[in-house]
Image (cartoon, rainbow, N blue to C red):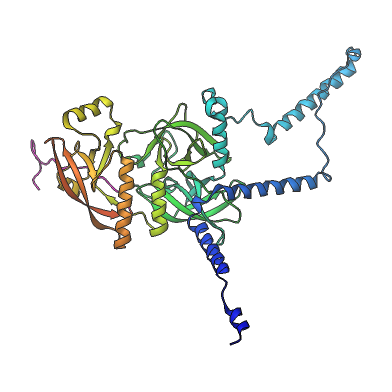
Amino acid sequence: MPKASRRRMRRDPGKEREAKKRSLAEDRTVMFAAFENEKIQSEAKLDRVYDNVVESSMEESSNPPSPLLHRPYIPDELADRADVRAAFQNAMLQFEADINRRSDLFTLDRYYTRSCLTKDRRLLHIRESAKDAVLLAANSVISLSSYLDDEPLNKCCGLWIQRDDKEKTAIVLTSAHLIRANRTTDPKKLNKWLFEWTGKYHRDASVTVHFLDGTTALANLIYLQEHYEFALYEVVVDKPVQLSTFNDNVHSGQDVLRLGRDESLDLSITHGRVDYRFPSSYERCHYMYFIHDGPDLVHDDGGPVIDIEGKVVGMVHNQSVESFLPSSILHKCLDLWRKLKCVPRPHPGMTFISIKLLDPICTERMRRKHNIQSGLIVEAVSKESNAEKLGIRRGDIIESFNGVYISTTIELEKMLLDIGGDHFHQAKVLDAEVDIRIQIFRATELCRRARNLTVIVSDCGEDIIEGTYPITVGFGKAIN
């Protein structure tokens, strides 16, 4: 073969490397769109703004300016003339009508729409940074509504978390309350779902996404996570969407802002601080809480809780009790879903409260009398669970899981998700058993025991069944 032919057949290593880089970049854009850097989004936004400016400047020559808005007055030398005074009255009426019409302009409604960032002088020290944070996060916050048999069901907010520019689709993260049964926004009616561990959902409900430009599109449910109560919807989009940026680091007392959208798609902004709190009955123990002053005027379940840099630190779970799912758990869930198309989680059959939430008087007493430094106090044990069979009872303390000392329920949830993900990656099946080594401090016996707790790894919500027994004869228990 001639040398020239051989040279033509040789591959260019540089071109191959560039082709591989382009291919990997395309894969990453789809797979990791929720973590796309802000520089690309900012450049796209500037391009769109400049395009609008150019179009407006081209139209100026063909559109005459609006009439001048000058206040009429009577010169002093004509003040005694009745006809001039009458003309002045008519001119003033016209002037006031023109003023009222101009007041409806979107640039002049600032006196009627004021959030806490403008009204509350106590926020002066964070006002400027908070405004920037809100505007940075706002484009990723949308509104969704659900319908069942053409009847309105629920409304929630949501976040853009992933997009596929090639397929022209995007994924919205929102609260599962959007399609939950037995839920009402009427304050006079009781929400039955508040007394359920795992609720019932209308998976076949029709869901509409309300874009920020006023258009709408139907959304398709692609995943529902019952335990953490979030849902993922896929939407066909023909326009750019801004993806959220998350921050796993959030701490008690931190200044945060809760965002939502009202009926007209205007933002609702509520300032508050992060809090840890004892969960109420039938409330899972992996939430953090948003505390603030003032009434709640809108329902923003599914909306973001953002820090002062505009990054999402959690998703509003239940606005009425002010709980939110922290981003550290959301990240693990979304990573598992992307890799496995499910969120496998071991069900320990217990609920807990953290010793860290106790008053320091109680904590110091535990440390002084029983050498207990940290851990999780068992709040409830599910009937006939393996935990109950091991002899674990309410008031016992679980100090460690698989040799790791756990001090908060958030830490426990992240560990359970790691265990579930590792197990599913190896076994490829759900509803299988796995052993977790736990160290128990038995409160009645004042002793420590290490035991293997067998748990089920599941993608479903965990139900904690209350232990009950029937009374069938006087002064005694029924005999099984």
Task: Find residue 19 and report its horizontal and vertical position in percent.
Answer: 56, 66
Task: Find residue 319 and report its horizontal and vertical position in percent.
Answer: 43, 37
Would residue 56 be seen by someone viewing this image from the given angle?
A: yes
Q: Does 28 sit left or right of 321 as displayed?
A: right
330 or 94, nearer to the observer: 330
Magenta stretch secondary structure, dominant: loop
Q: Does 185 sit left or right of 218 as displayed?
A: left
174 or 320, nearer to the observer: 174
283 or 351, nearer to the observer: 351
Task: Find residue 382 and report its horizontal and vertical position in percent.
Answer: 22, 45
Q: Does 243 sit left or right of 222 as displayed?
A: right
If the image is split into quadrants, where does the N terminus sit?
Answer: bottom right
Q: In this view, does 85 lie above or below 195?
A: above
For image coordinates 54% across by 25% down, the residue present is 124
State yes or no: residue 301 in magenta.
Answer: no
Would residue 202 be seen by someone viewing this image from the given angle?
A: no
Image quarter of residue 12: bottom right
Give the residues in magenta: 460-480
Task: Find residue 312 and report its horizontal and vertical position in percent.
Answer: 47, 42
Residue lying farthest to the front in this orientation: 3
Q: Does 150 sit left or right of 390 as displayed?
A: right
Q: Is residue 391 above or below residue 236?
A: above
For image coordinates 28% across by 30% down, the residue present is 358
State yes or no: residue 462 in magenta.
Answer: yes
Image quarter of residue 288: top left
Q: Number of marks in the image?
A: 0
For image coordinates 55% across by 62% down, the residue present is 167
